[in-house]
Image (cartoon, rainbow, N blue to C red):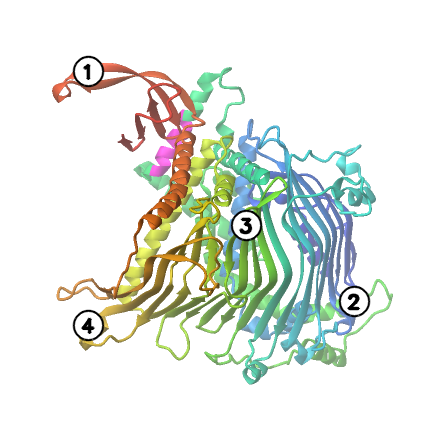
Amino acid sequence: MLEDQVAFLLQKYLGNYVCGLSKEALKISVWRGDVELTNMQLKPEALNSLKLPVKVKAGFLGSVKLKVPWSRLGQEPVLVYLDRIFILAEPATNVEGCSEDTVQEVKRSRVREMEMKLLESQQQLNSELNSSWLGSFIGTVIGNIKLSIGNIHIRYEDVESNPGHPFAAGLVLSKLSAVTVDDHGKETFATGGDLERVKKSVELESLALYFDSDSSPWSVDKPWEDLLPSEWSQVFEFRKQDISSTASKAHTYILRPISGKAKYTKVHVDEAKRSGQALQNAAVDLDDVTLSLSKDGYRDILKMADNFSSFNQRLRYAHYRPSLSVKSDPKSWWKYACRVVTHETKKASGTLSWEQLLRNARLRKAYVSLYASLLKSDMSRLVVEDNEEINSMDRELDMEVILQWRMLAHKFVEQSAETYQRAQQNKQQSWWSFGWSGSSKDDGDSKSFSDEDWERLNRIIGYKENAEYIPAQQDMKLMQFYFEIRMKHNASRLIDGSECLADLSCEDFCCNLKMYPEAKVFDLKLGSYKLLSPYGLLAESASVADSLVGVFSYKPFNEQLDWSFTARASPCYITYLKDSIDQIVGFFKSSPTVSQTLALETAAAVQMTLDEVKRTAQQQMTRVLKDQSRFSLNLDIAAPKITVPTKFRPDDVHETKLLLDLGHLILRTEEIWDSYTSEEQNIYLNFNLLLNDVSAFLVDGDYHWNDTSKEVNLLPVIDKCGIALKLQQIQVESSLYPSTRMAVRVPSLGFHFSPARYHRLMEIVKIFQDTDSESNSSNLAHLWDQADFEGWSSLLTWKGVGSREAAWQRRYLRLVGPFLYLFENPESTTYKQWSRKNGIGE
């Protein structure tokens, strides 16, 4: 029986990934609890779960070991060991000639996966199971798992997304291990009461992500499936000592190799109350995290996204696509287009005839009844996959309808399933007894499990027979979960060739999440940061500690609030270096080689996201005002101090600089404002905004914000000034009071003007004018750089008094997605008119 269970689980979780897996191929020793798989080939569809047009070109699974020492439980941990997982993937974007059977198989696979997710989300762990013998046993096994994963290399090679520029991306992991430890950090085995206080230690070694542009695909002298295990390792493993190895060539890392440690602790409720710590604690420490993006890599990523986007457009109706080209059989392609448009129109309309409605009702009744009866016939299976009648009905239905009807069938058999589950739980103890009293294949003798043995096993797993489950009363201030991430150093870089265009480095980053039964608290803290460029320093925090601190609390303690947000930022120094900023902006400018399809889809997605965010924000604000939610804002932001250097030298020696001090911003909510009646206080939200110490001045020569020398000649432009603003937003609509009330106070505002200041300011204005004109001209030229269609056309226009005279004008036409542009001639840099599907503009 155990052999069947193990074989079923292995086939369920590994059968979709490896070839030739069967019960006979498994090296299972039931009585020792050992399962070992070695040197397995991966299936081409092993990466289907990623929902990407990617397939496995070659794959190798070196070793999978699972050891559960049933007879020595309490002395040895449960071991899960994975080693040498090598995957070589390639695009799978060719949908030409895709058959109806292939499409239906893909649909069945997606329906099964979505159905399993829905079922898993609905299943809750019953308190009876947690207090049962089986629950205690499973808790012991999970609490003592020793996990070891090593030598993982997943590589994706693409030669079709960007023709002429093949690229490769890869994920590399040297080692990931997790063991149970004691208070001193030594490996141990938890039993009995110790299971309520478990500590796990996790180590991560050399996790990296690379993206190599202009990288040719790997090649071997023989078919991949004929490679020996040692040859797989030679190709995929990183070997520094072997310079001639293919994989040892330098990689362009998006995520440079990182290592770190993590700790997980679970304590008993009494100890948590006594010590003040959380019931579950998790902390991750990373030494150095560096992200990099190269210009060639950015180009290839856009091309890959464009290729995947085109594939997704073709995939839905791939089985309708003609096998011949458009020129060879244009008639079939017109039929294909009409069929797709008709299908989309019918689906969008949502209208059904009475005959269709009656037919769907009968089909629904038959489907749900049949599916429920199949589930009842075998209570151990969750999904029906091998019934021809169900598969035949599925071919006519959409996935959403199939899922809805299947979930109705699961509801009908839910009561029977619960009865079956209780019966199975009652048999578990006798089943395990049978397993221990069977014949041992290793020892050759018979073991009868005595009462003393049962008592010892129950003591090991912490199970108390006949103990009633009493739900614990929740302490609202008892922390349920605490999660923390700490990074000593992290950096983000933009690279063009061998030059680093921008390097943002941060020190002492830390964030944590505290979860209580109701309250949630998220903290963020950043020590310092610095942004460098080839032309100099762009930005730097003034403080080396706590340059940014933020706390968000949901239903905070000791306050009658729904949520609160507090943030504090120290000053930072920013230098406007035009050449550096132009390089950074140029890095992200869309290349002419990027198709308009991706650009339009991205623009549409961004617009939909912005609309959704706007709509959600409006709904939340309406709900806040309607429900009179109480919240608190407390922002204390030291605004940036900006330096704008120029090459203008009034004295032919010292360069002029403009210095802008944006002052200090404070935004707070207030409960009570004086001089208002109690009625007004109850219907208004009160905000208090204060901006002070704003100033601007000019200086010739070198100057730093911390420079207090009196020898520097400063030319004030704006004296230190501020503004105080009080804002009230109504919560309950009333005809007696306005929805918004605002009071503004500006104590004083002083400007300085002179010929010397005028000449210097004009030189500074030129810097921004040049940038704006260049960016505008480049944007105008880029809009129609890659037209889907272009050519000469004739345009009918109306002239004369009252536009009564019709005349044809010759114009050059460019069509870009849904946009149509009209030009005087092909060399024109600006258009005369433009239009789109839902409007016209001039």
- Front-lying residue, 782 or 189: 782
Q: Position of residue 319 (x, y in %)?
A: 51, 30
Q: Earlier in the sequence, mark 3 or mark 1?
A: 3
Instruction: Please tell me whether mark 4 sits on a helix, a strand or a loop.
Output: helix
Q: Position of residue 323 (x, y in %)?
A: 54, 22
- Front-lying residue, 648 or 14: 648
Instruction: Please tell me whether mark 1 sits on a helix, a strand or a loop.
Output: strand
Q: Amino acid at mark 3?
A: Gly
Distance from label 1 to label 2 (Cα)?
Answer: 100 Å
Of circles 2 and 4, the one toward us is 4
Q: Can I make out residue 375 in this image?
A: no
Q: Amino acid at mark 4?
A: Glu
Instruction: Please tell me whether mark 3 sits on a helix, a strand or a loop.
Output: strand
Q: Give the labeled residue for mark 2.
A: 438
Q: Amino acid at mark 1?
A: Ala
Numbered circles on residues, count: 4
Q: Give the labeled residue for mark 4.
A: 680
- The residues colored magenta run 338-348
Rendered-image quadrant of the N terminus? bottom right
Distance from label 3 to label 1 (Cα)?
Answer: 61 Å
Distance from label 2 to label 4 (Cα)?
Answer: 81 Å
Q: Amino acid at mark 2?
A: Gly
